Image (cartoon, rainbow, N blue to C red):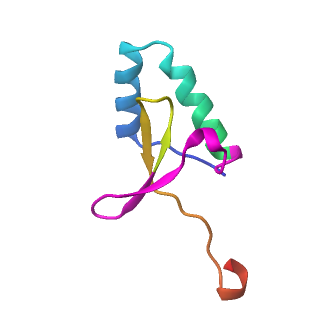
């Protein structure tokens, strides 16, 4: 899976990393894990209800979360089920 961050995410990430230098490597490791194994239990992936659409959340540590929208697949009925 390819993951791309928005400019806003990069801004917020840099701001958080200024306060906690160890957080940068944790963010990178978490995103790599999401790309390779989105169902890994340490991510604590779950759906959240946000506006205007539903999103997903994963955990970096017990205090820090990443919010994102996940597109899983596309195709005709037989291909996606």
Q: Quadrant of residue 52?
A: bottom left
Where does residue 34 sit, x and y in percent of width and height?
62, 44
Q: Nearer the viewer, residue 49 or 3?
A: 49
Number of numbered tags placed on the structure image: 0
Residue lying at the far bottom of the rendered structure: 77
Tell me which segment is drawn in magenta.
36-56
Where does residue 74 sit, x and y in percent of width and height?
61, 74
Left or right for 76, reference 50: right
Left or right for 56, reference 76: left
Rendered position, 28 above or below 43: above
Q: Nearer the viewer, residue 81 or 44?
A: 44
Where does residue 69 sit, x and y in percent of width and height?
46, 56
Q: Quadrant of residue 36?
A: top right
Q: Is residue 70 within the magenta segment?
A: no
Rendered position, 21 above or below 54: above
Residue lying at the far left of the rendered structure: 51
Where does residue 54 sit, x and y in percent of width and height?
38, 62
Image quadrant holding the C terminus, namely bottom right
Rendered position, 49 above or below 15: below
Residue at x-position 67% and y-position 45%: 40
Q: Is residue 43 within the magenta segment?
A: yes
Q: Quadrant of residue 55?
A: bottom left
Residue at x-position 64% and y-position 37%: 32
């Amino acid at each position: 899976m390819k993951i791309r961050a928005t400019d806003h995410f990069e801004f917020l990430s840099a701001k958080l990393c200024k306060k906690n230098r160890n957080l940068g490597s944790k963010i990178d490791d978490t995103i790599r894990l999401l790309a390779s194994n989105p169902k890994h239990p340490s991510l604590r992936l779950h759906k959240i209800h946000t506006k205007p659409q539903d999103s997903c959340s994963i955990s970096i540590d017990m205090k820090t979360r990443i919010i994102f929208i996940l597109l899983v697949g596309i195709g005709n009925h037989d291909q996606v089920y």
